[in-house]
Image (cartoon, rainbow, N blue to C red):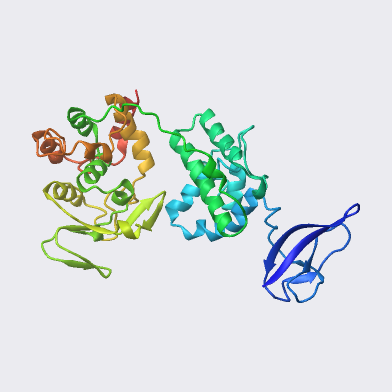
Amino acid sequence: MNSLRYRQADEENGWKSVGIDQFPRSADVLDPGPTGAEAVAFQVDGYGSRSITPKNYLAPSTEMTFADFVEQKFLPEHITLKRHPSRLYYQAILKHVITPEEVGRIFQMNSTDPRRRLKAIEGWPYLNEVRMCEVRHDHVSRVGSAAKLHGYSIETVRHIRNVIGTIFSHAIQTKCFFGENPVSLVAPMRRPCTQVQMLTPDKADMALAMMRYPERELTLIGAISGMGPAEVIGLQWGQINMMEEARDRKGIPIPPMTIAIRKCWYRGRLDDVKKSSRRDLAIDRRLLQVLLELRMRSLFTQPDDFLLVSQFGTPISYDNVMTQRLRPIARRLGVPSVSSKAFRLIQGDTKSALSSQPRFEIMLNQKPYWFGDRYPGARHRSERRELAG
């Protein structure tokens, strides 16, 4: 490696050093440098001195802005190594740190996508043009305060702080920033200690009675098995063994009466679950009854078909289920959530809707909408209007 010291011509004070960087010893990377007031560099590693300018070189760390560092260093060296859900997480949170338009350019996002609704907010303390060496804890505090002022949740403010901290941890590791991490001097915002109204067994019964396909099956499978929504939606029939003997699926042995958790569906993409989340779940009587209901449909029961599908055979959209069905039901019952997680919290109660009570057995024995009704169908739309009203 060649050590290159960047200098700039100054008419009054002569040459002024503006930074140090390193480049490979390659003849095709270096060209004769400019003269006069333009930036030049000279070699200082003991092999002599000559004016050179590398092609497409990274900005010196002292001149690199926050947006430059995210694009040139943090994205290729950290974000691209993450799984798809983590990459989407960074894209979403960075829109509150640098302008959304700059995030779209850096990540090469589709600018015509109607879901890209977030635009730059006037007066927001974006860090685009702030040099990395000049970022202090008050910059981080101002971004968090702006998010809180514009009505973002405490969780979002904490995510913003964590992402900025991760960026500067990487900058310190790569020697693009020296000193303490600016985030270390910013205390995380505390969550308010409010008493949340939990889902009661009686309201759980009412919620199940109001649910239809696919939110009913999504909630029951998640509550009984403990699977997350992305794991349930990404579940394929080939990963389920409801037989009394073991079977092999693409080299993966699946024991009898077992679900092999290997995939998840997140934001329109099928992805592998984390290594720590790979597991085999036993199928009990309650879960078996839900699975047999779904298996009785005439379409989309091949090994590569998904368990919960739309009328076209594609995986259901969790965002649509939450917006159009589960949240209206929760508002109607006056509870914060009717998700599978809310049902799991009351599962230990003897009156729980998920215990062996008559109400739960009746709900399992109800016909799903695959029998005689087209999904989503007019009947579903009229019920959505009733719930929304």
On the rendered structure, is 81 left or right of 364? right
Q: Is residue 131 above or below residue 14?
A: above
Indicate the position of residue 364 as horizontal and vertical percent values: 14, 40
Q: Quadrant of the N terminus?
A: bottom right
Where is residue 325? Give x, y as percent.
32, 34
Q: Residue at x 41, y 50 (%)?
A: 268
Residue 104 placement (x, y as % from top left) = 58, 48
Q: Residue at x 66, y 49 (%)?
A: 133
On the picture, is 319 further left or further right than 65?
left
Q: Is residue 375 above or below residue 170?
A: above
Residue 344 seen from this side: yes
Name the one closer to the observer, 12 or 350.
12
Tag count = 0
- 193 on left or right of 28: left
Q: Within the image, what quadrant is residue 255 found in? A: bottom left
Q: Position of residue 223 (x, y in %)?
A: 22, 43
Quadrant for the C terminus, please: top left
For residue 365, what is the image quadrant?
top left
Which residue in the rendered view is the most extreme toward the right?
A: 12
Specify whether residue 91 is in view. Answer: no
Q: Nearer the viewer, residue 114 or 101?
A: 101
